[in-house]
Image (cartoon, rainbow, N blue to C red):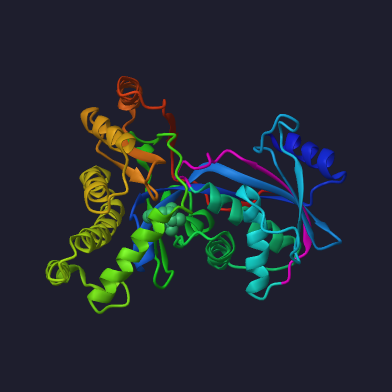
């Protein structure tokens, strides 16, 4: 929706003008899956898809929120909901849990926030593995901070957003999505060390090399509150414990074979597979970052395919639809392709010559049709700017 339309919607809803508009993007993870929950490296980038929050202060301790994406028969553009900052009204469900969780996380971290009217508009698809939750958390966090006169660094805001999701929504996610939304720069992937939160902007400009990144949303919804994500985290923690380290990150990259042999002696084949994914993925992230740094986009491709195989066979978080996208990408001449995000549905990305994008998309549609899958949704994306105040 255009800025003028949004301003108008805000007036219509709350009877006064908005004080500003804050925007936070979704992300695509180029590589580094489940490494953030092992204190390792990740390499995501922000998408042009955004969640925008128009906001104005209220004199009471209430968040009044409306999302233009919440559709019902009575209110095709979303109803207005009131959430009490001081409790009461129970624990809201669905998307409403997020704005309140952010306010709670800010206050639990010692920041006093004001009540606010919030109008939310987003083109980040929900449940597609593109971090619609982080985009919502980060945009709301920035709006609430600005209205409350709080100045937080981007990474500090990301940590608040993660805390909101971990403690007040109940999803045990890592820091990758929120950090990508807050700290990304256009034309770059974000190399983030999730242990010390140091970031490095790595130039990544596929277009300049006549390449495109195609995101294929399988439209198989994934939700992280389910047990599978927590289960994978737990296996990683068990593997670290069995190896006597705080996190799998502590295994040096030249000692991974030895570590896996030691794990194999526990007789737990599943632990070996989970750890093998994390340890090999950590090496792939650093290698991809090095290739990008050297401007060698073509060498990145095989590492993406290898990452997918590892997620499929060792970490076991792929789906038949995601595997189909990656297979078709291979036969369509893509340099590389892999599932992106937590898996169990959601999206895959392909790095492919721009003049092959149409053919690839046609082949995916044909394959999905032949196998009776839900038709997928495509977007061609590019590393974009991170969260900011728009006006
Ligand atoms: C989700 C989580 C991230 C990360 C990925 C898997 O997106 O929110 O923290 O763990 O899954 O790489």
Quadrant of ligand 1 in image? bottom left
- Residue at 32% in and 26% down: 364
Residue 46 located left or right of residue 138: left
Q: Is residue 353 visible?
A: yes
Quadrant of the image occupied by residue 244: bottom left
Give coordinates of residue 198: x percent, y percent: 42, 69
Above or below, 367 against 227 in this view is above
Q: Is residue 215 left or right of residue 8?
A: left
Query: Residue at 36% of width from left, 59% of height from top?
Result: 231
Q: Is residue 309 left or right of residue 103?
A: left
Residue at 35% across, 65% down: 234
Image x and y of residue 73, in percent: 71, 29
286 w.r.t. 324: above or below: below
Horizontal and vertical percent for residue 34?
35, 58
The count of marks equals 0
Locate residue 212 relative to residue 278 in the image: left or right: right
Quadrant assignment, res 246: bottom left
Q: Residue at x 48, y 54 (%)?
A: 225
Q: Position of residue 224 (x, y in %)?
A: 46, 52
Magenta highlight on residue 176: no
Instruction: Inspect this view and state whether residue 190 appears.
Output: no
Residue range of the region highlighted in magenta in the rendering: 112-130
């Amino acid at each position: 929706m255009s800025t003028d339309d949004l301003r108008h919607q805000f007036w219509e809803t709350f009877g006064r003008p908005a004080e500003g508009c804050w925007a936070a993007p979704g992300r695509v993870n180029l590589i580094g899956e489940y490494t953030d929950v092992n204190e390792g490296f990740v390499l995501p980038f922000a998408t042009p898809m955004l969640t925008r929050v128009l906001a104005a202060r209220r004199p009471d301790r209430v968040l009044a929120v409306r999302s233009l994406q919440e559709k019902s028969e009575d209110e095709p553009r979303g109803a207005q909901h009131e959430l009490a900052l001081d409790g009461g009204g129970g624990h809201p469900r669905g998307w409403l849990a997020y704005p309140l969780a952010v306010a709670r996380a800010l206050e639990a971290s010692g920041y006093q926030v004001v009540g606010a009217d919030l109008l939310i508009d987003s083109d980040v698809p929900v449940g597609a593995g593109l971090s619609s939750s982080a985009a919502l958390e980060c945009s709301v966090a920035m709006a609430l901070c600005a209205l409350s006169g709080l100045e937080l660094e981007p990474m500090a805001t990301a940590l608040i957003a993660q805390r909101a999701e971990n403690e007040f929504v109940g999803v045990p996610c890592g820091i990758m999505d929120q950090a990508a939304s807050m700290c990304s720069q256009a034309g770059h992937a974000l190399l983030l060390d999730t242990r010390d939160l140091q970031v490095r902007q790595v130039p990544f400009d596929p277009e300049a090399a006549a390449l495109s990144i195609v995101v294929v949303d399988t439209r198989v919804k994934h939700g992280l509150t389910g047990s599978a994500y927590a289960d994978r985290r737990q296996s990683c923690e068990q593997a670290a414990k069995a190896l006597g380290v705080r996190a799998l990150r502590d295994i040096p990259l030249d000692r991974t074979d030895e570590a896996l042999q030691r794990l194999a002696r526990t007789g737990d084949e599943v632990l070996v597979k989970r750890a093998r994914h994390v340890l090999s993925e950590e090496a792939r992230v650093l290698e991809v970052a090095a290739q990008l740094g050297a401007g060698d986009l073509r060498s990145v491709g095989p590492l993406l395919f290898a990452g997918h195989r590892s997620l499929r066979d060792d970490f076991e978080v792929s789906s038949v639809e995601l595997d189909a996208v990656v297979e078709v990408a291979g036969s369509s001449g893509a340099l590389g392709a892999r599932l992106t995000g937590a898996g169990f549905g959601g999206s895959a990305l392909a790095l492919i010559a721009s003049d092959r994008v149409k053919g690839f998309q046609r082949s995916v549609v044909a394959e999905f049709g032949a196998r009776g899958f839900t038709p997928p949704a495509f977007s061609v994306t590019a590393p974009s700017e991170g969260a900011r105040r728009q006006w």
